[in-house]
Image (spheres, rainbow, N blue to C red):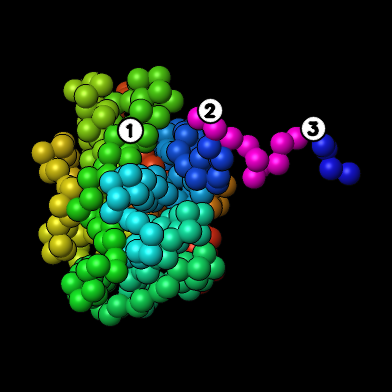
Amino acid sequence: MIDQTLTPISEQRRADGSVMSVLDDVGNTPLLNLTEFARHCGGQDGVQMYAKAEWANPGGSVKARAALKIVQEAMTAGKLGAGQTLIDSSSGNTAIAYALMGAVKRFAVHLVMPTNVSRERKALVKAYGATLIESDPLEGSDGAIRLVREIVAADPQRYFYADQYNNDANWRAHYEGTGPEIWRQSQGRVTHFVAGLGTTGTFVGAGRYLREQNPAVQLVAMQPEDELSVIEGLKYLQTAIIPGIYDPSLVDRHLTISAETAWEATQELASKAGLFVGISSGAAVAAAVQVAKELSTGVVVTLLPDDGSKYVSLGIFD
């Protein structure tokens, strides 16, 4: 029997009277304690390690934060109006977030993704009603960027090009959300922040906020060890198109992680910590553990960008 005292979700409203939606759940993700896992991997007793569980966002990843900020600012500025189609390139998670927001806010979404992204990601994009345009798998995310630019140039009036790699709303989402959450949840004790570089929005936004709160916080940027090391969601910036929002002056230290190390850490997180996460999460934890092993005291914080559900078909968990 339905409890008639509960207000249906469709009728719940914000303080300003507007109707709430699933997008109100973006942000405020849990900060998980991975200290025991770090010690299992060789971390010192005086070091604590934590990670943000970003799969708790609608759409299942950290990219919901940037995608929502990009959409909100575009609508406010009149850049994403009636009849226009949002278009962008993505290796997966941002595409899923855009598709979800298009379904909620009723605008068309076209997404350019490399052909070789996992079938789960393609299925999720289509489930939300977005149009998938596949780019050359050998060109990776850079090939998707080049293709989306060609499409927009051919019909600029039709599209709002979200351009996550060069849109300041990307890093601002983390400056206004992720960074303050980490500072609050760690009670201001964070000493090292470790994040992977993809669009670089998470590292730049959260890192910039944390640096303003405490100039002594060490910002560690992680990327694949070379251009042949494929870690979903991350870029090897030395040979990639550099995101316009990237601020290298924020980096205190660069760390590189091999694809094999990322896969092993992803498997270990599932079997030893009960965390079913994606490959970029494994890479982030591997880098954070490396930092933790070098310290005698400190609080190391990283992010788990998504869960493992979109990577099952890759065979990583077989």
Are the residues tagged 1 and 2 within 8 Å (C-beta)?
A: no
Badge 1 marks a residue whose secondary structure is: helix
In the picture of the structure, the residue carrying the numbered disc 2 is 15
Residue at 11%, 38% in the rendered image:
249
Q: Amino acid at mark 3?
A: Thr
Whether residue 10 is visible to the viewer of this picture, yes or no, is yes
Q: Are marks 1 and 3 in contact (CB under 8 Å)?
A: no
Residue stretch rendered in magenta on the structure:
5-17
Kindly identify which numbered label has been placed on residue 5.
3
Name the kind of residue labelled 1 in the image.
Glu
Q: Secondary structure at mark 2?
A: loop
User: How far is disc 3 from disc 2 in space, using C-alphas?
Assistant: 20 Å
Question: Where residue 285 sits: x, y (%)?
Answer: 38, 45
- For the stretch drawn in magenta, the main secondary structure is loop
The residue to which callout 1 is attached is 176
Q: Quadrant of residue 141?
A: bottom left
Q: Is residue 15 magenta?
A: yes
Q: Is 72 drawn above or below residue 16 in the view shown? A: below
Residue 306: x, y in percent? 45, 52
Q: Give the left or right position of residue 70, taking residue 272 as reference.
A: left
Q: Looking at the image, which is closer to me, 210 or 44?
A: 210
Where's the C terminus, which quadrant? bottom right
The residue type indicated by label 2 comes to Ala
* Neighbours of disc 1 within 10 Å: few (<14), some (14-19), many (20+): some
